[in-house]
Amino acid sequence: MATVMVVTDAAGLSPVARPDGDDLPLFLFGTLRDPALFEVVFGRPQQALACRPALLPGHVAVRVDGADFPVLIAAPACRQPGLLVAGLAAEEVARAVFYESTGYRLARVRLTVAGCAAEARAFLPTGRLPVSGERWRLAAWRRRHGARVVVAAGLAFQHYGRVDAAAFDALWPEIEQETAARLAASARPRSRRGGLHPSP
């Protein structure tokens, strides 16, 4: 079991669980592997960091019931693929903790990288999210929801450093509504000289 200490986020607002060994790389198994979402959440592009494929033995990512994002569950016969990210600053990790909110906690995990054992941190479930029995896949999520989630994440980070985790969770319905409104507005043809024309 990981040794966990409770600290506050960058704004000193919400307590978050972080494992000892804050210098360990971060293992991403879900939506944060998407380059566009990665850049919004961490504040810089994937290619600016040392990112390598990795496998987490004994686990698999499954879809949260009623949603389309994943949590890790124990599965002895499985190995969950993901992205191992080294060189993140403490503030960048704090941004990810804020985005993942109360449904996840950071903990140490042991994984394999290019056939070698390694240690990392990963977002494990806190038990607050209901789990389905359906395996979650990044490519399918990206096709169905990727663009919408990137817009929502941008709106979410307007609240970074201003609200605690519980308040942030409560804001998600409002963020989703604003996201839908923005996407609808961007898809609507603009009027020009009395006629309807697509945006340039």
Image (cartoon, rainbow, N blue to C red):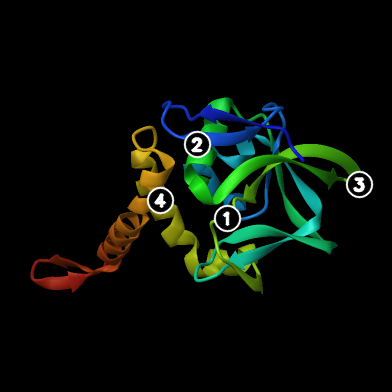
Mark earlier in primary sequence (3, 4): 3
Type of amino acid under label 3: Gly
Q: Which image quarter: residue 89?
A: top right
Please name the residue that numbered disc 1 is placed on.
31
Judge left or right: residue 142 versus residue 192: right
Type of amino acid under label 2: Arg
Residue 131 horizontal/vertical position (percent): 60, 66
Height in image: 7 above or below 66? above
Few, some or many C-alpha atoms within 10 Å of disc 4 (few <14, some 14-19, many ≥20)? some
Few, some or many C-alpha atoms within 10 Å of disc 3 (few <14, some 14-19, many ≥20)? few
Identify the disc placed on residue 95: 2
Please name the residue that numbered disc 3 is placed on.
115
Q: Which image quarter: residue 197?
A: bottom left
Height in image: 66 above or below 176? below
For this rendering, which residue is in front, 153 or 47?
A: 153
- Measure the C-alpha gap from mark 3 to mark 2: 30 Å
Give the secondary structure at mark 3. loop
Judged by depth in the image, the label closer to the viewer, 2 or 4, is 4
- Measure the C-alpha gap from mark 2 to mark 4: 15 Å
Judge left or right: residue 153 versus residue 114: left
Q: Quadrant of the N terminus?
A: top right
Q: How many marks?
A: 4
Few, some or many C-alpha atoms within 10 Å of disc 2 (few <14, some 14-19, many ≥20)? many
